[in-house]
Image (cartoon, rainbow, N blue to C red):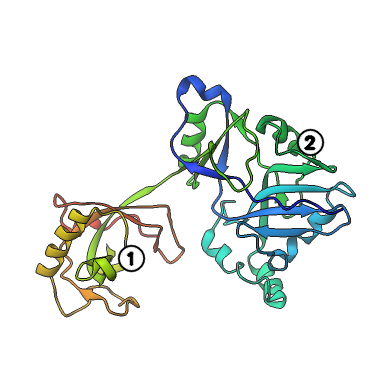
Amino acid sequence: MRLPRIAPMLATPGGLPPAAQDPRWAYETKQDGQRVVVYLPGDGSVLLRARSGDDITAAYPELGALGGALGSTPAVLDGEILVLDERGRGDFQRLQSRMGLAHAPAMAARRAAEAPAHLMLFDVMHLRGDGLTHLTYARRRGELESLGLDGPAWSTPSAIVGHGEAALQLTRDNGLEGLVCKRLDSVYEPGVRSRAWIKIRNLLTADVIIGGWSPGRGRLTGLPGAVLVGQREGGRLRYVGSVGTGWSEDERAALARLLQAAACDTCPFDPVPHAPGARWVLPLLVGEVRYSTRTRAGLLRQPSWHRLRPDLAPEDSAADLP
């Protein structure tokens, strides 16, 4: 059967709905993976399209068996591809080794054995020849759950209706990326970033020491484009990442003056990171950054500058290194 091509609906960043509206919303765990629209024509085949619309089917050969999961029933599904860690959470660093291999099937097969993918399904937009995008989330969710799609490499995680505060706290307690809030009466809006879906990302904070900076370009010429930061570990300053967002213009200019005053010729990080063009500074300035998680190597993912911490001495920044 020829299935309609459907762009995924997108969520808007925000916070929990007001408490009085809580019973009108469903809550799903926000996954740290690759968004995918799944096409099941009902002939045993499966087609996976990334959010960009690219065909990524060949990158995930272990999901091929999903083509027969519904028999001859055609469907278009929405979901997220993950690579799970030992605790069953999405590990984006492991997933990165699987992405971009749609044109390298032999390598994709090898990587599938090393870091198997898992598809988590959370919506259905077309089923048995009928479009469902005009139906409410509550009705689509019921249709999805009735399909019983739980297999060796795919599952249909549950959604919670109401209890948003508790659901958000549960994601925090379990170190998950966040929460997606979906209004029960909302229709599916292909390709639209809608207020009917709200995503809440759990951000962690860390105190870090600035050990260098990378010059900015264009309008940021002469100013720091990013600062290179680390944390103390066993008497050495270990590099944990580059932070290039989170400042106002005034804050960036003030930070530039502090960095120029602390300039030195020697890299304070041990070992020295790969940072072409970096300018080094004495490790005296402590800042606080926000980030989503850490890589297995201990680097901060998606770090954003929050504030300087003049109340902290550099030796106070030894913290939650893995």
Count up the numbered dots: 2
Residue 166: image location, x then y, percent: 49, 30
Which amino acid is tagged 2? Answer: Ser
Picture residue at 50% right of the left edge, 37% below the top: 170
Residue in front for this viewpoint, 156 or 231: 156
Q: Which residue matches tag 2?
A: 146
- Residue 195 appears left or right of 142: left
Please identify the quarter of the rendering in which residue 297 is found.
Answer: bottom left
Q: Is residue 318 above or below residue 71?
A: below
Q: Say what secondary structure mark 2 lies in.
A: helix
In three-dimensional space, the C-alpha distance between marks 1 and 2, rounded to whole angstroms, equals: 46 Å
Residue 151: image location, x then y, percent: 76, 50
Picture residue at 9% right of the left edge, 68% below the top: 261
Residue in front for this viewpoint, 112 or 22: 22
The tag on residue 60 is none
Which amino acid is tagged 1? Answer: Ser
Q: Kindly indicate whether the residue at mark 2 contacts the one at mark 1 (C-beta within 8 angstroms).
A: no
Q: Which residue matches tag 1?
A: 242
Q: Is residue 113 above or below residue 82?
A: below
Picture residue at 28% right of the left edge, 64% below the top: 229
